[in-house]
Image (cartoon, rainbow, N blue to C red):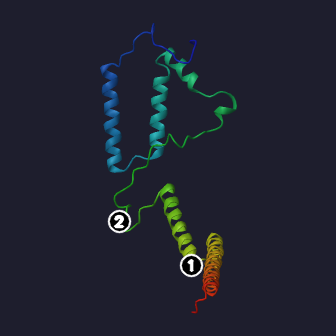
Amino acid sequence: MPRGKYTNHKGRSRRFTSAEELEEQRKKDEYRQKKRERGMESSEEEEEEKEKASDEEGGSDSEESDGEDANKNKGVASLIEIQNPNRAPPKAKKATAISEDAKPELSRREREEIEKQRASAHYHMLHAQGKTAQARADLARLAIIKQQREDAAKRREAEKAEREAAKKDKTALTQKALGKKT
């Protein structure tokens, strides 16, 4: 076994497929194709053909069998069948199975985005009605500010009235001191 992760093919003898092997393979493929068209070939026949093909190829070359041993799992791993879901080819959908009435399914991100928009709109509606905690806090703060402004306005009015009264008193005193009557 070579060192490292990868094997190279340097130094190996070249293996060419002979014309007879190619012709035999072509005939087998044609035969299988005809049977499939007729619908006669069953899974048992396919398994038998695969077994025959593996028996014929098994005794051909010792270098190939070394590579096959490396692919086989050893120990308990050979008993456990592991399927990689990412490795499975995508299944083709038949045109008859696809219905035009069915709604296209949204992806998870699209669904979450729509749900987020709905929740936001619902929150804004409740906020406008004053039913959320933040809206109640805002209204309470606005009420306090309004009360403070009203108090300030009353104070200014009172101070203005007081200044006018003081001004009237002063002018009255000045008029009295000068001896004028009003």
How far apart are the alpha carbons under marks 2 and 1? 42 Å
Front residue of 56 and 131: 131
Quadrant of residue 21 within the rendered picture: top left
The residue identified by callout 1 is 129
Residue that sits furthest to the right in the current view: 76
Residue 55 versus residue 176 in the image, above or below: above
Q: Indicate the position of residue 27 as horizontal and vertical percent values.
A: 31, 33
The residue identified by callout 2 is 100
Q: Residue at x 60, y 79 (%)?
A: 160
Front residue of 132 and 110: 132
Q: Give the numbered dot on residue 147.
A: none
Q: Residue at x 45, y 9 (%)?
A: 10
Q: Indicate the position of residue 151 as horizontal and vertical percent values.
A: 65, 78
Q: Amino acid at mark 1?
A: Gln
Which callout, 2 or 1, points at the residue further toward the start of the chain? Answer: 2
Residue that sits furthest to the front in the current view: 179
Q: Indicate the position of residue 67 as horizontal and vertical percent values.
A: 53, 20
For the N terminus, the image quarter is top right
Would you say 53 lies left or right of 150 here? Answer: left
Quadrant of residue 152 within the rendered picture: bottom right
Q: Indicate the position of residue 149 as horizontal and vertical percent values.
A: 61, 75
Would you say 155 lies left or right of 92 here? Answer: right
Q: Local crowd at mark 2 within 10 Å, few (<14), some, or many (≥20)?
A: few
Figure label count: 2
Residue 70 versus residue 95 in the image, above or below: above
Q: Amino acid at mark 2?
A: Glu
Q: Local crowd at mark 1 within 10 Å, few (<14), some, or many (≥20)?
A: few
